Image: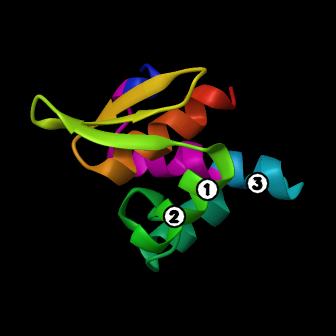
Amino acid sequence: MKTTELTGQALDFEMYRHACKVSGKQPSQEQFEQGYANGQFHFHQDKALMLDLVETYKINTQYLAQEWLASTDRSSAWGETPLIAVCRLVLVLNP
């Protein structure tokens, strides 16, 4: 599945892997699944995270054609919500 098509838990797992990479930790499928079941790692729903991502990656968001666009001067991604679009873009920018 393309990064720009990820949703739900699959999107959250890729964001978890990215967060581990940024923080110098080794990602663990088991740790993710346990945490996810306990309400952790729901990145695509964590509205407090959005501002940090927008500031860190200098992301612009706008609502066009009934969908959200997150963009930088390097790339862009669409999503059903601004946070989903931003998460997808962060993954596109950091393969």
39 vs 13, left or right, is: left
Identify the residue at image location x=40%, y=69%: 47
| Residue 62 shows up from this direction | yes
Q: Mark 3: which amino acid? A: Cys
Q: Mark 1: which amino acid? A: Glu
Per the rendered image, the range of residues in magenta is 5-16
Q: Mark 2: which amino acid? A: Leu
8 vs 2, left or right, is: left
Q: Which mark is residue 51?
A: 2
On the image, the x and y values in percent for residue 6 come to 38, 34
Q: Are marks 1 and 2 in contact (CB under 8 Å)?
A: yes
Identify the residue at image location x=84%, y=58%: 23
Residue found farthest to the right: 24
Query: In the structure shown, which secondary structural element does the residue marked by tag 2 occupy?
Result: helix
Quadrant housing the N terminus = top left
Question: Foreground mark, 3 or 2?
Answer: 2
On the image, the x and y values in percent for residue 87 come to 48, 45
Query: In the structure shown, which secondary structural element does the residue marked by tag 3 occupy?
Result: helix
